[in-house]
Image (tube, rainbow, N blue to C red):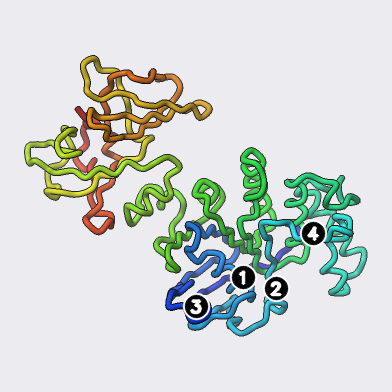
Amino acid sequence: MHTESLQVRVVIDAVTKRYGKSPRKALDGVSLDIEAGELLAILGPSGSGKTTLLSVLAGLETTDEGRLRFGTDDVTDVPAERRNVAVVFQSSMLYPHLSLRQSIGFALRLQKVAAAEITARIDEVAGWLRIGHLLGRKPHEVSGGERQRAAIAKALVSRPALLLMDEPFSAVDAQLRRQLRTELVKLHKEFGTTTVFITHDQEEAMGIADRVAVMRDGRLVQVSEPLELYRRPTSAWLADFVSVQPFNLLSVRHSGDGTLEAFGGELVLSGPPRGDLPDEFDLGVRPEHVTLRPADGSALRIYTREVFGGQLKYTVHTPKGEEIVAVSSEENALAVDTPVEIAVDWRRALAFGPGGDRLDIDFSVSGGEPARVS
């Protein structure tokens, strides 16, 4: 059986929100179009405004300026209980004295839905979330992950037009969090409810979402599909923020003879496959696009090594202690203190101007081999 759920397009039009008399805007002219049936992740650091935006969508907070539309309906001044919105919070928000089945179906009983319909809906959603065998238990009798699955079931069983999730997996361990994320993607594919997922975890946002909206200081800084956000971030801050590993950002000088000098000339990058570069700019290279090769006599040495499953993360130090981070597979494992040379994959390199905005430079436009840092 497949549950037919409503899908709604959400339009956020120049919404501004302040708290009290503070001059700071929690939301500063935010405009965003969320497609019907989309799973959108809103990503940002603490204080960026992402939870405030969720509260405005839910009707838990009012707006100072701007409008909200669900489909063709203006819901800016519509109270929360009339918006057909469900929210999943960090804590499960289940009723401690009720069984999971009773908690999940509580709102449906208030709505006078027929008992047989309530049972059918609960059984279907619980089956998808693999908690059908737990429905007779109370929240304290199940694990944290099972409670959170029940909270999602409680939200979905009412067939909301819009599902809002406020960091719902932050209270569980890393392995379970990855499992719940996978289940959420499958669940969204099945039910298709328009979903907004709030998180500060870039790996989580990039892994689950159709698109990612990144917020900073109450504003949207980029809205893109995950791969586009990864490959073409609009700023150095954003490139670093969406990186799982530390982003390498090197201030370089173009010498005009086919080399780039970094760290005041301590490092020289040879052979960028194009010569029409600014005299000075910031070069951005992700650790996974840096390759280390043993090189006797090199002044560069591996300073630390960390193991992440089948991947190894290295920090490489220059003689003066400047640092570059590289990530490679276990097949090319190198020991700490090994002298190395570094190869940069220019196809993935990024350039940024003085203000941190990305420059429209394609280093690989002329082809060629990755350049080495010597």
Alpha-carbon span between mark 4 and mark 1: 26 Å
Give the image location of residue 259, x and y in percent. 13, 36
Q: Of marks 4 and 1, which one's residue comes earlier in the chain? A: 1
Mark 1 touching mark 2, by CB under 8 A?
A: yes
Q: Quadrant of residue 30?
A: bottom left
Q: Are marks 3 and 1 in contact (CB under 8 Å)?
A: no
Q: Position of residue 69 (x, y in %)?
A: 56, 78
Q: Nearer the viewer, residue 322 or 110?
A: 322
Q: Which mark is residue 190?
A: none
Q: Would you identify the image quadrant in which residue 234 lies?
A: bottom left
Task: Give the number of the mark in front: 4 or 1.
Answer: 4
The residue type indicated by label 1 comes to: Val
The tag earlier along the polypeptide, 2 or 4, is 2
**Residue 321, relative to residue 152: is it above or below?**
above
| First in sequence: mark 3 vs mark 2 | 3
- Residue labelled with disc 4: 94
Residue at the disc numbered 3: 18
Which is in the foreground here, disc 3 or disc 1? Answer: 3
Q: Which residue is mark 1?
A: 8
Q: Secondary structure under badge 3?
A: strand
Q: State which tag comes first along the sequence, 4 or 3.
A: 3
Looking at this rendering, what residue extends furthest in the left direction? 257
Q: Amino acid at mark 2?
A: Asn
Can you tell which of label 1 and label 2 is closer to the viewer?
2
Percent position of residue 35, x then y = 54, 66
State the CA–CA distance, disc 3 to disc 1. 27 Å
